Amino acid sequence: KFNIPGNTTATFKQKLNYIFPIIHIKKIISLLSDEGRCLDVYDNKNLINDSAAIDEAMKHLTLLWKNMFGLKNLYDTTLSDYNYQCIKDNKIILEQLVDNCLKKRCSTVIIVPPFSDKLNKYFSDEFVKITLEENVKEVKRKYPKLLYLDYRLSSEFQDDAGLFMDGGFLLNRRGSQILIKKIFGDLKSEFYLNN
């Protein structure tokens, strides 16, 4: 028997509910028993292997981006005033981030992840140049210590949809390991990093 306010003969369960009113024993036990089921981000995703399903996933992703950013498509270089303003605002934010990092003597790196050819086919080179590359290169000119690693068209990832969970954008475990090795190799040569 336990003594809690309003109940001098409380049970152990009542005492625990009084001390931990939000946390319940059953929830703690289920949380602990569920813990082993999902060890990393890859455990919760289903891999897409079928070519038609990959194409459909990439179409859906590009449609999502077009809707999100108010774009007609991902290859036309005629953008709205709103899009140009967003690009300008994002460049200012990027400059501030880089400036703050460099002031704190951090080695600063901008990394563009790889896409497979299944996703890259939706982008024109001119569109990517206007929306991404020119802006990052301007920031790079302003901050020469900034390192810019662009893996979007990296050859290892172009023809191998099997390196992606969705066939073109979300790297799976193997794809992530290849990318990490590639990044470390580039950082090692650039910043003279040790193993």
Image (spheres, rainbow, N blue to C red):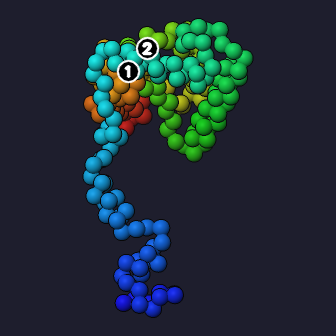
**45 above or below 33?**
above
Residue shown at the point (45%, 16%) measured from the top left: 59
111 vs 171, left or right, is right
Nearest the viewer among 178 and 103 is 178
Pointer 1 residue = 168
- Asked if disc 1 and disc 2 are in contact, CB closer than 8 Å, the reply is yes
Residue type for callout 1: Gly
**Which callout, 1 or 2, points at the residue further toward the start of the chain?**
2
Q: Position of residue 63 (x, y in %)?
A: 51, 19
Q: Examine the rendering and report whether any part of residue 181 can be seen.
A: no
**26 above or below 170?**
below
Residue shown at the point (41%, 90%) measured from the top left: 9
Pointer 2 residue = 120
Q: Quadrant of the N terminus?
A: bottom left
Residue type for callout 2: Asn
Q: Position of residue 14 (x, y in %)?
A: 41, 79
**156 above or below 19?**
above
The quadrant in which residue 80 appears is top right
The quadrant in which residue 127 appears is top right
Residue shown at the point (61%, 41%) measured from the top left: 100
The quadrant in which residue 70 appears is top right
Label 2: state its secondary structure.
helix
Q: Residues within 10 Å of mark 1 (few under 14, many from 20)?
A: many
Q: Which mark, residue 83? A: none
Marks 1 and 2, how far apart at CA: 8 Å
Label 1: state its secondary structure.
loop
Q: Position of residue 153 (x, y in %)?
A: 41, 16
Q: Examine the rendering and report whether any part of residue 192 can be seen.
A: yes
80 vs 6, left or right, is right
Q: Quadrant of the C terminus?
A: top left
